[in-house]
């Protein structure tokens, strides 16, 4: 558990969705560093210094910023980066939301750490309202393939945040079991085994011109684009993400 900040914090966020969450908690003035992928809210974060990417953090740049706290994520950042940061940063806050309701603990963790408990509780209330709407309708089960990369083709395992978000709507990502969290796959092996192929906008930005190629490999499946920020970004965007998925699933009904 991270110790509460004593006085004004100097925060470096290495997690795009958490950078957005920190701003939603009213901590934008305590953010002193971000990754190049931290782009929301743009009018706020564009003035905050960049420290590299999520996987290639410039440690010397972080050191220069003299942070009191650096926020990392198990999936998005490298373990060795977190270990190196721990050698000179007073507090390295490690996060790992794996399912939608983990956002409640995330809001409260950061709210407690940076003395924004009231703001965190308001986010919890908004999340609970969105979650209630998301679970109010019983959707028929569907097997889906969620693509995050091309060349090689890559998807998500069932224990990832993306898969758990889709499962909330009774959409089950395939394969049901995988040895890696983001496995490489033979796309043709899913022909006749999934009802829909979802092409994410990130990290690879799929477009409609990919439909024909994928349709030839996964015969019989419907193909559609999906906003990756709405399925993979936890934090404050998860609230909008649940609302987005309610409408997306309804529009995709047979």
Image (cartoon, rainbow, N blue to C red):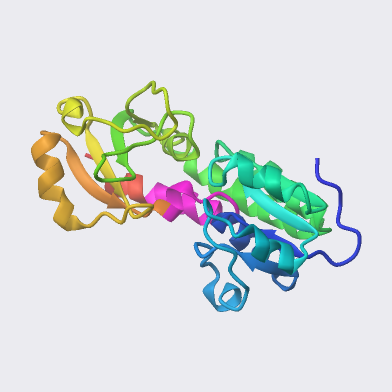
Q: Residue at x 24, y 44 (%)?
A: 151
Left or right of residue 24, residue 252 in this image: left
**Residues in magenta, as a range:** 229-247
In the image, residue 223 above or below residue 43: above
Q: Residue furthest right?
A: 6
- Quarter of the image for residue 144 reads top left
Give the residue furthest to the front: 60
Predominant SS along the magenta part: helix
Q: Position of residue 182 (x, y in %)?
A: 40, 35
Q: Nearer the viewer, residue 119 or 43?
A: 43
Whether residue 208 appears in magenta in the rendering, the answer is no
For the residue pair 147 and 186, the one nearer the viewer reads as 186
The residue that appears at 60% across and 52% down in the rendered structure is: 235
- Position of 212 compared to 56: left or right? left
Q: Left or right: 121 with respect to 166? A: right
Q: Quadrant of the C terminus?
A: top left
Total numbered labels = 0
Residue at image coords 41%, 47%: 246
In the image, residue 109 lies at what x, y percent?
A: 75, 47
Percent coordinates x, y for residue 245 in the rendering: 41, 48
Work out whether residue 59 or residue 200 is closer to the camera in this orientation and state it.
Answer: 59
Q: Work out which quarter of the rendered image holds the N terminus and state it.
A: top right
- Please determine whether, in this image, residue 44 is positioned above or below residue 169: below
Q: Residue at x 90, y 64 (%)?
A: 7
Name which quarter of the figure residue 111 lies in: bottom right
Residue 27 visible, this angle: no
């Amino acid at each position: 558990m991270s110790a509460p900040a004593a006085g004004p914090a100097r925060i470096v966020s290495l997690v795009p969705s958490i950078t957005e969450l920190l701003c939603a908690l009213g901590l934008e003035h305590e953010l002193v560093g971000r990754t190049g992928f931290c782009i929301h809210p743009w009018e706020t974060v564009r003035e905050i210094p960049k420290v590299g990417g999520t996987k290639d953090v410039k440690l010397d740049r972080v050191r220069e910023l003299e942070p009191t706290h650096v926020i990392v994520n198990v999936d998005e950042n490298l373990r060795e980066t977190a270990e190196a940061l721990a050698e000179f940063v007073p507090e390295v806050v490690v996060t790992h939301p794996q399912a939608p309701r983990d956002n409640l603990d995330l809001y409260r963790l950061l709210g407690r750490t940076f003395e924004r408990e009231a703001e965190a509780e308001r986010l919890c209330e908004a999340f609970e309202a969105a979650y209630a709407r998301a679970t109010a309708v019983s959707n028929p089960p569907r097997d889906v393939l969620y693509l995050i990369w091309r060349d090689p083709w890559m998807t998500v395992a069932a224990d990832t945040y993306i898969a758990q978000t889709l499962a909330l709507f009774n959409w089950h990502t395939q394969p049901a079991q995988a040895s890696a969290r983001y496995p490489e796959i033979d796309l043709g092996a899913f022909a006749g085994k999934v009802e829909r192929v979802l092409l994410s906008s990130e990290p690879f930005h799929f477009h409609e011109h990919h439909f024909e190629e994928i349709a030839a490999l996964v015969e019989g499946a419907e193909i559609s684009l999906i906003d990756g920020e709405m399925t993979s970004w936890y934090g404050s965007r998860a609230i909008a993400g649940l609302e987005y998925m309610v409408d997306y699933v309804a529009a995709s009904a047979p």
